[in-house]
Image (cartoon, rainbow, N blue to C red):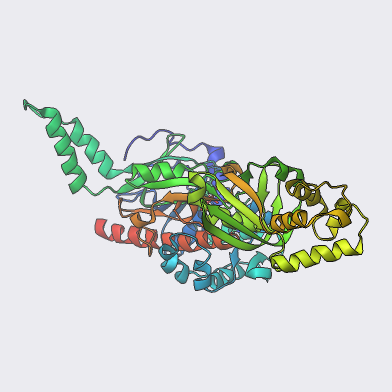
Amino acid sequence: MRGNAGSQATAPRREAREKVSGRKSSGEPRLPGKTGKGMPDADVLVIGGGAAGMMAAFFAAEAGARVILLEKNEKAGKKIYITGKGRCNFTNACDPEDFLSHVPCHASFLYSSVYGFDPAAVIAWFEEHGCRTKVERGNRAFPQSDHASDITKALEQAMRERGVQIRLHSEASRLILSGEQAETEREEIPLPGVSGQCRERAADRADVQQTVRRTVTGVCLSDGTVLSARAVVIATGGLSYPTTGSTGDGYRFAEKAGHTVEPCSPSLVPLCCAEEDLFEMQGLSLKNVTLRIFNGKRKAWDGFGEMMFTHFGVTGPLVLTASADLADCLRKGQLKAEIDLKPALPEEKLDERILRAFEQNPNKEIRNVAPEIYPQKMVPVLLRRCRIDPQKAVNSITKAERARLVYETKHFSFTITHPGSFREAVVTHGGIRVREVDPGTMESRKTAGLFFAGEVLDVDAHTGGYNLQIAWSTGRAAGLGAAAYAKSQSKETE
Ligand code: FAD
């Protein structure tokens, strides 16, 4: 083991740890290095006490592993409290196939973990652990109390019962990698009296990289404490809502462990738009509309449902889903979009509908008749776009003006300049390349003993409880995978 800085846990801190873990320590200052002969501090160390990390810790402990969960915040599950507007839409009660259709990319990576712990099993798990649940419109599952805290309580209680040691205020700062250590040691050995030393050293290092499989042996905390473990699970989340603790630390750790991190961008996020007249309609919600998005001339996306205007662009369920499906396009540049305000009416029928309204009020100004067909907030914008004087009496509206109104109703266009920021994104698109991770166990294919779970991976889904389901399924797979790996290692050292 490396350095022991910060090893002597102070009494108040020890008490706090005992309080959260429900375990009593011997009273002796606990040395952070190996706890017994050949015995590391933990079989499984989980970094990140979010949804994925807590589920991983529970399953690893249930499989018999000694587990330590590290969470840098003052409490675990900080993000869970704000999910589903405080009610936590913790899964979607659909079957696994349907679930996978809501994962826009790398759905096949989730196949094994989701079938292993599907939405029905997740609902049953929470019921078994004291959280009554209910299913609402669109199969969205919530705690019956409508309190997200019930989800966190169930997880904490379950972890305590399995003896997981939860360490709050504990920020992992880096992984300890044994292959890395070996490489450094080789580099420091002087190569005696050989010319072209640098070249040979480089070749030597390449040999080391090929022959020594990198293995994770523990974690260094930001206060200098070193914790050893047979297996480490990275469940540090993505980059969205950084105030909840998700600041992308796991990407850094993974890169050091030889992983590729796919570019990250905000997903399930409002979209910023160029046209200022949109901002006049902020707060206006449109129901039963069709939104189409174009990448150049090609239609890249369309959907039917509800959306809303904001002071910077558009948001709402349709927009959030589009932002997830088009995350890669959105990163590359501007996109054109249009709303069909009356998707149920073909153009001729719409024209008839408008004419009928005009005929019933022939002398009224159009600005007073249009609200029969359009939301009030939209009328001035629409009329301006159609170049129709709002004070004009409807009996003097020309055929050409009416045609423009019909066209604008079916093709209300705008430009999407960029997605909103990570601060307002529900999830992060991108992350650890899934090809480098075993989908059954979530084990790294680059570093032995390293596992991943949750949003840190390059998988994200639509709204509706699907993202938390990813956290539960991958968390369970990683917990079980890490416990099995730790067991195999302990047998080897016996
Ligand atoms: P996180 O929840 O981000 O947890 C990561 C944890 O790791 C954090 O607690 C963090 O503090 C800790 N951590 C990070 N770095 C370190 C470190 N170096 N050392 C120690 N600890 C560290 N999904 C749904 O399915 N349904 C919803 O209703 C829903 N609503 C949402 C609403 C909002 C506003 C947001 C932002 C998201 C919502 N989501 C929802 C998405 C969902 O919350 C996430 O997909 C899910 O929480 C990801 O879980 P995770 O455990 O992978 O990551």
Q: Residue at x 78, y 51 (%)?
A: 378
- Would you identify the image quadrant in which residue 152 lies? bottom right
Is residue 287 at least partly visible in the picture? yes
Q: Looking at the rendering, in which quadrant would you find the C terminus? A: bottom left
Q: Is residue 219 visible?
A: no
Relative to 333, is 66 on the left or the right? Answer: left
Say above or below: 423 vs 67: above
Q: Is residue 280 above or below residue 298?
A: above
Residue nearest the observer in this picture, 410 or 245:
410
Residue depicted at 83% across the width and 56% down the height: 370
Q: Does residue 153 appear to the left or right of 110 in the view shown? A: right
Count of numbered badges drawn on the protein: 0
Q: Quadrant of the N terminus?
A: top left
Residue at 52% x, 44% y is 239
> Would residue 399 appear left or right of 120 to someone viewing this image?
right
In the rendered image of this protein, does residue 275 appear above or below residue 435? above
Could you tell me residue 271's position as x and y percent? 61, 47
| Residue nearer the viewer, 164 or 341 | 341
The residue lying furthest to the right in this view is 363
Q: Position of residue 98 (x, y in %)?
A: 53, 71
